[in-house]
Image: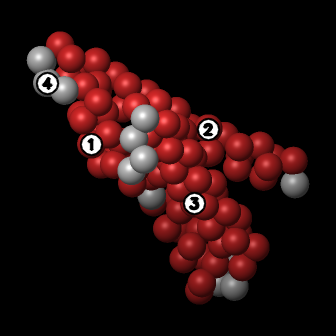
Amino acid sequence: MEAFQHKVILVFCTALGMMLGASLIGSLAALLAKEPPVTTMLKLAREIKIWAVAASLGGTFSFLEVLESGLFEGEVRAMIKQLCFVVSAIAGTQVGYYFLLVLVGDKG
């Protein structure tokens, strides 16, 4: 059970880091290109959510394989674990997005 909890935390933090890193570095690029950095940062954060979820899960094929084995081979426990990982990744992206909103002072 300990490895499962560690993986859930790892997935959460990876998704959170991808959201924050991509948005902040993207806003730096916008600043260098003389575009509004805050607007660019929030736009990037909205657009990158799904990619942060997929990357923090290690890609989508392993997730789909486990989901398939859960549905067609009756491995419900593996399927529930994968769904927990997905929820953890989505939570990480949302926390990152809300953190950016607080950072820029947007009520969005």
Q: Which mark is residue 13?
A: 2
Residue at which label 4 appears: 35
Q: Secondary structure at mark 2?
A: helix
Q: Amino acid at mark 4?
A: Glu
Callout in the foreground (2, 4): 4
- Residue 86, numbered circle: 3
| Quarter of image, res 68 | bottom right
The crowd level at tag 3 (other Cα within 10 Å; few <14, some 14-19, many 20+) is many
Q: Nearer the viewer, mark 1 or mark 2?
A: 1
Q: Residue at x 65, y 84 (%)?
A: 73
Label disc, if present, on residue 43 of the rendered structure:
1
Residue type marked 3: Val
**Which label's residue is closer to the chain start, 1 or 4?**
4
**In the rendered view of the protein, which quadrant contains the N terminus?**
bottom right
Q: Which element is circle 4 on?
A: loop
Can the viewer see residue 52? no
